[in-house]
Image (spheres, helix red, strand yellow):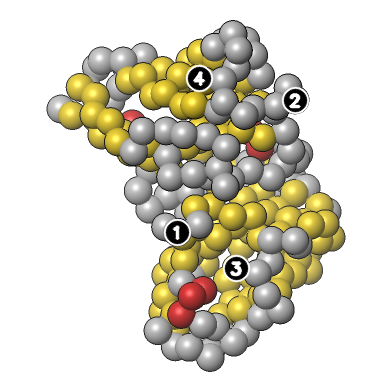
Amino acid sequence: DAKTTQPPSMDCAEGRAANLPCNHSTISGNEYVYWYRQIHSQGPQYIIHGLKNNETNEMASLIITEDRKSSTLILPHATLRDTAVYYCIVTGTYKYIFGTGTRLKVLA
Amino acid sequence: DAGVIQSPRHEVTEMGQEVTLRCKPISGHDYLFWYRQTMMRGLELLIYFNNNVPIDDSGMPEDRFSAKMPNASFSTLKIQPSEPRDSAVYFCASSPGLEPDTQYFGPGTRLTVL
C-alpha cells in the first residue's frame, strides 16, 4: 500500500500557484519525499524530492513540515501543460509505490 | 538523446498468445527497470537490471513473465502465455544510478489481452 494520502483532484487557474498537499504520517527518518507527475499517455516524470528541508528547482518547490508528516508541492505559475496526475511518494530505497495521486487540472 | 524508446506503443492480443515488449534505454545508463501500471494496483516495479544483469525480480508476478537484457542497449519483457489480467501499461525506465530521481521513463506500451 502507498504510504501517502493525496486529494483525488484539484483545479487551478492558469498563471496562479498550484499547491498540492500530501500526508505521509508514517514516514521513517531515512525516507525521502519524492514527487512525480504523469501527463496523459506518457511515462512518469520526476519533479523534485527532499528529506526535511524545503527544496526548489526549475520546476517546483517542495515544502516539508517540521515533523515531516506532510508536504506541499508548489507549481508557482501553473500553465495548461501542467495538467497531469501528481504523485507523492515516500521511500528510502529504489522501490516505491505510486498511489492514486492528485489529478490537477489547470484551467484557462 | 531520444530518451527511452519502447515498442510497440500499443499491443492487442488474444489470451494464450506470447507477447514481447521491447525497450532501448538511454545510452550510458547502467540501470534498466520494467514497471507495470494498472488502475487497481498503480505503478509496480517488476524487475531491474544493472549492467545487463537482473538484480531484483521479486516484482515479477508469475513464471509466465520473463525479462532479458542481452546487451546494454536492448531489453525485452515477455509474457507467455498472456492472460486478460495482464492488460496494463508497461513502462521501461533507465537511469545512471539507483536513486529514484535519476530514472527516465519511456512512453509505455499499452497491452490489451482479450
Figure check: A67 above or below B10 = above
- Chain letter behind tag 2: A
- Note whether residue A60 is visible: no
The circle on residue B40 is: 1
Q: Amino acid at mark 1?
A: Met
Cα distance in 3D space between marks 3 and 2: 35 Å
**Labels 1 & 4 near each other (Cβ < 8 A):** no
- Chain letter behind tag 1: B
User: x%, y% of residue B86?
Assistant: 51, 74
- Note whether residue A31 is visible: yes
Q: Secondary structure at mark 3?
A: strand
Question: Could you say which quadrant of the image residue A54 lies in?
Answer: top right
Figure check: A54 above or below A38 = above
Q: What residue lies at 38% left-to-right and 53% top-to-bottom?
A: A41
User: x%, y% of residue A19?
Assistant: 36, 19
User: x%, y% of residue A34?
Assistant: 58, 30
Figure check: B35 above or below B19 = above
- Local crowd size for mark 4, using a 10 Å CA cut-off: few (<14), some (14–19), many (≥20): many
User: x%, y% of residue A9?
Assistant: 30, 36
- Residue named by callout 4: A71
Q: Secondary structure at mark 2?
A: loop
Q: Nearer the viewer, residue B37 or A25?
A: A25
The circle on residue B22 is: 3
